[in-house]
Image (cartoon, rainbow, N blue to C red):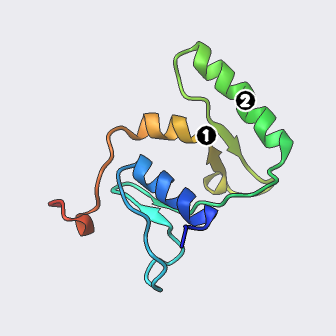
Amino acid sequence: MADKAWKANERRFARAVGVERIPVTGERHGADFEDGIACYQLKVRKSIPTWLWAWLSGIQGTGQRKGKAGVLVLKRPRAKDAEAVVILSWQAWCDLHGQPTATPEQGEAA
């Protein structure tokens, strides 16, 4: 039986950072995949606010002209600065991420 689209996406994104998708066994605690520096949960949605794409596109253009990653930071009014979220393209993340790193559970020495 072929993978569902969401599962295929999780596998592809996990492999982009050098790991495998975590099977749904009750032990993943919301993480679809993880590497040596992050736990990831991938959501594929038909609709994402157009303003987010417009803002991200704008800062990506600025970053590209300067040879840097374009990063969008979103913060709710009256929220603590530490609660703001960072948004960047997957390609920018992979570029910043560097070479794929494995977690100790994947067999590499810690």
Amino acid tagged 2: Ser
The residue positioned 84% from the left and 40% from the top of the image is 51
Q: Nearer the viewer, residue 12 or 81?
A: 12
Quadrant of the image occupied by residue 89:
top right
Identify the image quadrant of the N terminus: bottom right
The residue positioned 46% from the left and 40% from the top of the image is 94
For residue 77, the mark is: none
Q: Are marks 1 and 2 in contact (CB under 8 Å)?
A: no
Q: Is residue 34 placed above or below 90 in the rendered structure?
A: below
Q: Nearer the viewer, residue 83 or 14?
A: 14
Q: Earlier in the sequence, mark 1 or mark 2?
A: 2
Q: Nearer the viewer, residue 25 or 62?
A: 25
Residue at the extreme front of the image, as rendered: 1
How many residues crowd mark 1 within 10 Å: few (<14), some (14–19), many (20+)?
some
List x then y, in percent, for residue 60. Answer: 65, 27
Q: Which residue is mark 1?
A: 88
List x then y, in percent, for residue 75. Answer: 73, 49
Amino acid tagged 1: Leu
Residue at the extreme right of the image, as rendered: 50
| Spatial CA span between label 1 and label 2 | 10 Å
In the drawing, does residue 51 fall left or right of residue 106? right
List x then y, in percent, for residue 68. Answer: 53, 23
In the drawing, does residue 84 fall left or right of residue 1? right
> SS for tag 1?
loop
Q: Nearer the viewer, residue 98 or 18?
A: 18
List x then y, in percent, for residue 25. Answer: 45, 84
Quadrant of the image occupied by residue 20:
bottom left
- How many labels, in total? 2
How many residues crowd mark 2 within 10 Å: few (<14), some (14–19), many (20+)?
some
For residue 57, the mark is: 2
The residue positioned 44% from the left and 75% from the top of the image is 23
